Amino acid sequence: MSKRRERIVFALSCLGLLALWQALSMAVDSPVLVPSLLDIVKEAWSVIRSKAFLLNLGSTLLRGAESFALIAAVSIALAVASHLYKWVSVALRPLLLLSKAVPVMSIILLAFIWFSSAAVPVFSAFLMGFPIMYTQVFSALESLDPQLEQMCLVYGITGKRRLRHFVIPSLEPYLIVGSRQALSVIWKAVIASEVLTVPGLGVGSRIQLAQVQLETSRVLAWTMAAVLLTALSDGIFEILLKRKASWR
């Protein structure tokens, strides 16, 4: 299928979903249960124009960025240690299994018992995103071409030159994919944590407050802001992957 046809099918699919929502709204005829598209657009515009919009969005962005930086630093360090020392990778297996198996809500609720509401989103997002990033980096290190490593030794390419011309280019695709996958989980974990813990500022906090007041259109408006965060981060990494492919 050509790119043009893909775009047409995608656009028609989006229009179909919007039409289905509008038809459901008209059939139910209750703005609390299923608000109309016009009500949602009006509420979204009202949210965007409010002074608190950037503050709440910025707070969620900051928590997501903190989580991502922590995940990247810890994952890379432990992946390198696991690559060099087998016992480290074995020791990390129970933590990875727990992080993948334990429900998100359980992690958030336990974190709420242990930490302040401001720290819960960062901690929860870390536990959800760490296994993804760690696995990608560790897989990249394990799949380094031994022949290329041998070539580096033969030609005396060591230290910073080896890191720059061999290790980093080999790791880069895995890092991009791992970052993309981790960020999609991070936004969900951060916003879910904000919904449950209701810190002073945050997209999740606004969603929770709107839900308590039965303002369904406002819940959807803030949800659109959350979707936008995921879409933007996903789009950035999509561009990076395409550029990486074009460089080859």
Image (cartoon, helix red, strand yellow):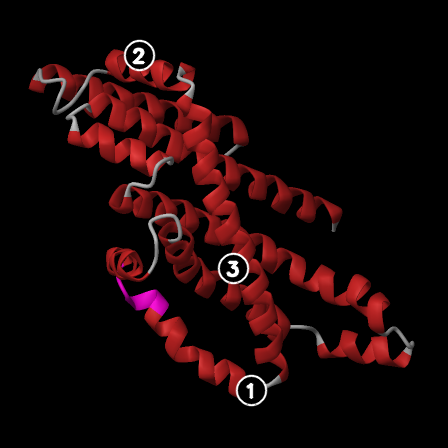
Look at mark 2 in the image and give the residue it sits on.
42
State which tag comes first along the sequence, 2 or 3: 2
Q: Amino acid at mark 1?
A: Lys
Q: Residue at x 52, y 88 (%)?
A: 87
Q: CA distance from mark 1 to mark 2?
A: 57 Å
Look at mark 3 in the image and give the residue it sits on.
71
Q: Secondary structure at mark 3?
A: helix
Disc number for residue 86: 1
Cβ–Cβ below 8 Å for labels 3 and 1? no
From the viewer's side, name the closer residue of 35 and 78: 78
Judged by depth in the image, the label closer to the viewer, 3 or 1, is 3
Question: Where's residue 132, x and y in %?
Answer: 46, 62
State which tag comes first along the sequence, 3 or 1: 3
Q: CA distance from mark 2 to mark 3?
A: 37 Å
Q: Is residue 106 visible?
A: yes
User: Circle 1: is it few (<14), some (14-19), or many (20+) Cα within 10 Å?
Assistant: few
Q: Is 102 inside the magenta-drawn segment?
A: yes
Q: Residue at x 18, y 19 (%)?
A: 35
Q: Residue at x 33, y 21 (%)?
A: 15
Q: Residue farthest to the right?
A: 155
Asked if 71 appears above or below 247 in the picture, the reply is: below
